[in-house]
Amino acid sequence: MTSSAPSSSSNLRTVLVTGGCGFIGVNLARSLRAAGYEPIAYDNLSTGRLGDGQAAGYVEVIEADVLDADALASAARGVYGIVHLAARTGVIDSVNDPRGDIEVNVGGTLNALLAARDAGASAFVFASSSAPLGSVDPPGHERLAPRPLSPYGASKLAGEGLCSAFAGSYGLAANALRFTNVYGPFSYHKGSVVAAFMKRIMDGDPLTIYGDGGQTRDFLFVDDLCRAVTAVLDRQPAGDLFQLGTGIETSVNELVERLVAIFPDREIPIRYEPARAGEISRSFSDISHARDALDYRPSVGLDEGLHATRDWFVNAPRA
Ligand SMILES: NC(=O)c1ccc[n+]([C@@H]2O[C@H](COP(=O)([O-])OP(=O)(O)OC[C@H]3O[C@@H](n4cnc5c(N)ncnc54)[C@H](O)[C@@H]3O)[C@@H](O)[C@H]2O)c1
């Protein structure tokens, strides 16, 4: 167990962030501080970095696993809320090791919910994804029947179910947020398309587009996502599901055009390869429920977000 600083004495607005040293977690720490919360990170550092967590503004960094129910319950004692980000995040990894994925993602979520319930927490936020929906005609929204295509998607659907059950059975304000393709600073270790392309540009490698590049995604800048998480903590919905994203559909070809434009000094070769089996062709979100219930209004446009991400990657220490 590693502490960077003593924890808050009041615990009045303390928020425990599992997976707090990862990409979203280190960005979230800053948002939580700005919104008046005292965030504590809880992370086994399997992909997250201790240094990033310590620099992010957490009042404490606890090095432990979400599968350690006792350690998690002890860390949660007296907190106002829990944001549960810790997970195995790779879709392909989940296909290769479904048992491991389900154990960490479902078992870890159950432990986090039990810790929140037993601590009498006022709010719980679960990091879900669009993966529970599987292949649906976009836009994705909360009323569609989920049909996940991967163990990862199934693990997130199970997590959504557990949140609903803890709201129904114990009155815990457990809310699941479905994140789309999140991008931004501190994503060096991520395999998602913006991070992968940024790394390749940094290394002078060609960008590989699978298929014709017409496949679309809903790219969400991490600061907008963090504002949504903070809104849930502030408002404490009784237990709900929110589809996030921007509502804007962007093709991979358009993303690449924008990336080329923000690196005018670099030669960026582009390579097309055959489409990958199972890749979803179109994906974006209907965010009207989050807009109505949380006043969620993503405000960072793709160019602005890509500029901020580029500035971070240009100066980022390589892993
Ligand atoms: N980044 C995205 O685009 C995206 C999209 C949809 C959903 N999500 C979800 O958001 C959450 C955060 O994702 P991220 O992109 O920041 O990933 P990340 O890998 O950067 O962060 C995950 C963090 O969890 C920690 N962790 C993993 N297993 C753990 C365990 N057993 N015990 C304790 N800590 C553990 C890791 O060390 C890491 O710091 C995940 O639940 C992910 O599934 C992310």
Image (cartoon, helix red, strand yellow):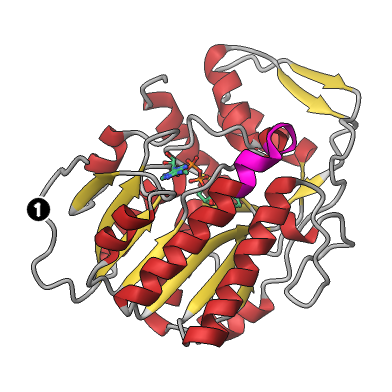
Question: Is residue 52 shown above or below 317?
Answer: below
Element carrying mark 1: loop
* In magenta stretch: residue 96: yes
Question: Is residue 257 shown above or below 174?
Answer: above
Image location (x, y in percent) of residue 256 = 71, 33
Is 7 left or right of 211, judged from the image as shown? left
Image location (x, y in percent) of residue 309 = 48, 38
The one of 165 and 24 positioned closer to us in this rendering:
165
Report the span colored magenta: 94-102
Quadrant, the N terminus = top left
Quadrant, the C terminus = top left
Is 271 left or right of 130, judged from the image as shown? right
The one of 257 and 106 positioned closer to us in this rendering:
106
Q: Which residue is drawn at 45% across and 82% down?
A: 172
Q: Which residue is drawn at 37% across and 36% down?
A: 45
Image location (x, y in percent) of residue 240 = 59, 80
Task: Examine the image and state in which quarter residue 88 appears.
Answer: top right
Find the residue positioned furthest to the front.
70
Task: Examine the image and state in which quarter residue 291 appears.
Answer: bottom right
Q: Which residue is drawn at 47% across and 68% down?
A: 125
The one of 87 and 99 positioned closer to us in this rendering:
99
Q: Residue at x 46, y 81 (%)?
A: 173
Mark 1, residue position:
6
Image location (x, y in percent) of residue 33 = 25, 62
> Given the image, on which type of amino acid does mark 1 rest?
Pro
